[in-house]
Amino acid sequence: MIRVLLAEDQAMMRGAIAVLLDLEDDIEVVAQVSTGTDVLPIALRKRPDVALLDIELPGVSGLDAAADLAAQLPECRVVIVTTFGRPGYLQRAMAAGAVGFLVKDGPVEGLADAIRKVASGRTVVDPDLAGAALRAPRSPLTLRERDVLAAAERGATVADIADLLHLSQSTVRNYLSDAIGKTGTRNKTEAALLARRNGWL
């Protein structure tokens, strides 16, 4: 029996996926969580074989949760299941240790099959997205530049970002300037939009 942890913030979607997977003879959903913060502690307790993680989770993103699992529970194979089929997300997911990346609009049979494949040691990636990711540019942003842009995207001022990230305002301005330059945009709003569209945030 393949033991699965399911992390999805939308209750209806989470419940539907769990019910459909439980219909499979060889798959058992042993845990369901609605936040990224809960992924690691529940996984350490339940010891699933596979974790299905949405990217957009409250608290901790699915990508960060994938990295936490890779570091602290490497025997748990991570599959990212997302609405957002962006090449940058796929690149970041693989870098975080995920072994699967699927878009939610695929058939549930494909999800069950992907679970079986990753549980047996294989890697499963949506084929269209894999091709796009190979052609897409890698993120030029550093981790700090991403943090600053993500805060700016939410409408934070330079002073707000400085307080949030424990940086000086001049350092925040430098990070924003570097991010704007690297993305070839005119201001922080355009830089954040471009980074989000490419899956770099």
Image: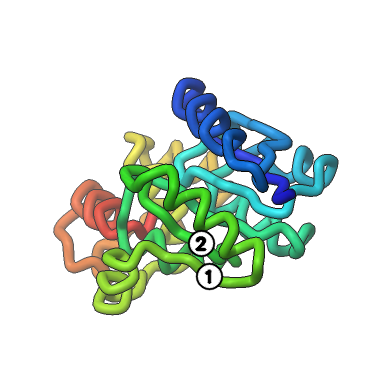
Q: Which mark is residue 123?
A: 1
The residue lying at 52 percent from left, 49 percent from top is 112
Outermost right residue: 45
Callout 1–callout 2 Cβ contact below 8 Å: yes
Instruction: Kindly identify the amino acid type of the residue bearing the numbered disc 2.
Output: Gly
Residue 115 showing in the rendered view: yes
Say left or right for 5 vs 153.
right
Tag 1 secondary structure: loop
Q: Report the colour scheme.
A: rainbow
Q: What x and y, as percent, mark residue 9?
A: 51, 29
Residue labelled with disc 2:
100
Q: Earlier in the sequence, mark 1 or mark 2?
A: 2
> Residue at coordinates 34% horizontally, 57% vertically from top-left?
199
Q: Position of residue 157 (x, y in %)?
A: 36, 38
Q: Residue at x 38, y 36 (%)?
A: 156
Left or right? Give the position of 78 relative to 126.
Answer: right
